[in-house]
Amino acid sequence: QVQLVESGGGLVQAGGSLRLSCDASGIIVSTNHMAWYRQAPGKQRDLVAWITDGGSTKYADPVKGRFEITKDNANNMVYLQMNSLKPEDTAVYYCNAYYSWALRPWGQGTQVTVSS
């Protein structure tokens, strides 16, 4: 059974850091491209960062240089290290497969709130 469980969010001041974790049960991260997405209130869900099965990474322009996506194949986990956080990073963060055809049911996400 596929179950995506995100954790690690919270309230942080601007300039702070958070590390998000994703337990990607049901998706084998070692053989799938994985991604982090975020959805701010009243906005669509956007792609934030992705990591290929081989470990290559790409980032959306708003987070480039501040966020880092990594994964642990042995434990089937995906992480998002977020540094220099800005109020505009406030959103619910989700992990899932990268390709639309591979998306699984969305998890609950984890709320990130950045205060100014």
Image: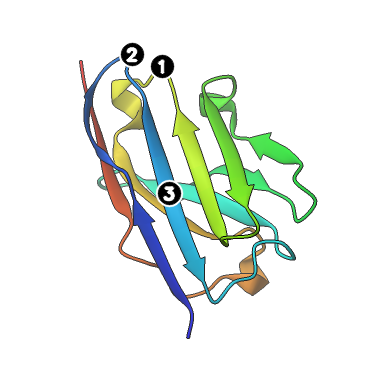
Q: Between marks 3 and 1, how big is the CA–CA gap?
A: 18 Å
Q: In which quarter of the image is the C terminus?
A: top left
**In this view, 9 is above or below 1:** above
Q: Nearer the viewer, residue 110 or 87?
A: 110
Q: Which residue lies furthest to the bottom in this view?
A: 1
**In this view, 79 is above or below 28:** above
Residue at x-position 61% and y-position 48%: 71
Residue at x-position 53% and y-position 56%: 77
Residue at x-position 31% and y-position 41%: 91
Q: Residue furthest right?
A: 54
Q: Between marks 1 and 2, how big is the CA–CA gap?
A: 4 Å
The residue beneath circle 1 is 84
Kindly identify the amino acid type of the residue bearing the numbered disc 1. Answer: Ser
Residue 111 position within the rendered picture, expressed as x and y whole percent measured from the top left: 26, 46
> Is mark 1 in CB contact (under 8 Å) with mark 2?
yes
Q: Callout 3 environment at 10 Å: few (<14), some (14 to 19), or many (20+)?
A: many
Kindly identify the amino acid type of the residue bearing the numbered disc 3. Answer: Ser
Kindly identify the amino acid type of the residue bearing the numbered disc 2. Answer: Gly
The residue beneath circle 3 is 21
Which callout, 3 or 2, points at the residue further toward the start of the chain?
2
Residue 15: assigned label: 2
